[in-house]
Image (cartoon, rainbow, N blue to C red):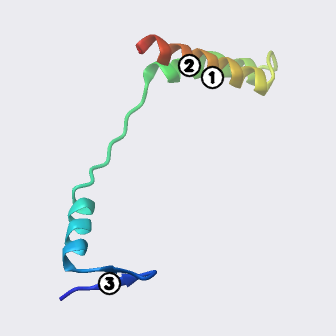
Amino acid sequence: MLSMTYDNVHMNEEHVTLILNIIENIHGSCSSDPSALLIIQEEAPGYFTDQRTLDDVVNIIQKRAATVVQERG
């Protein structure tokens, strides 16, 4: 019988089996948002060409990204 104790919490074989089942069924996922990347690509050069401060560029990116998210509902 498999049994573990962690910080005074006893995990019997059933608990361990349930946790292992959860872990074994985890699937990774990766996605990106082309709209967000486009906003960054459009705004970042302003910082690198000394036309805007870093704070200005970050604020613009955040506002534009928030608008995109809000429009999607």
Three-letter amino acid code at the position of disc 2 = Ala
Label 1 packing within 10 angstroms: few (<14), some (14-19), many (20+): some
Q: CA distance from mark 3 to mark 1?
A: 46 Å
User: Where is residue 4 shown, x and y percent of the image?
Assistant: 32, 84
Q: Residue at x 55, y 19 (%)?
A: 65
> Which residue is outermost to the top?
71
Label 2 near label 1: C-beta < 8 Å?
A: yes
Label 1 near label 3: C-beta < 8 Å?
A: no
Q: Does 27 sit above or below residue 1?
A: above
Residue topped by disc 2: 66
Quarter of the image that includes the C terminus: top left
Three-letter amino acid code at the position of disc 3 = Met
Label 2 near label 3: C-beta < 8 Å?
A: no
Q: Secondary structure at mark 3?
A: strand
Residue topped by disc 3: 4
Q: Residue at x 24, y 72 (%)?
A: 15
Q: Secondary structure at mark 1?
A: helix
User: Where is residue 51 shown, x and y percent of the image?
Assistant: 80, 15
Q: Does 21 sit above or below residue 31?
A: below
Residue topped by disc 1: 62
Three-letter amino acid code at the position of disc 1 = Gln
Label 3 packing within 10 angstroms: few (<14), some (14-19), many (20+): few
Q: Secondary structure at mark 2?
A: helix
User: Where is residue 36 shown, x and y percent of the image?
Assistant: 51, 22
Q: Residue at x 51, y 24 (%)?
A: 37
Can you tell which quarter of the image residue 57 is in?
top right
User: Where is residue 41 shown, x and y percent of the image?
Assistant: 58, 20
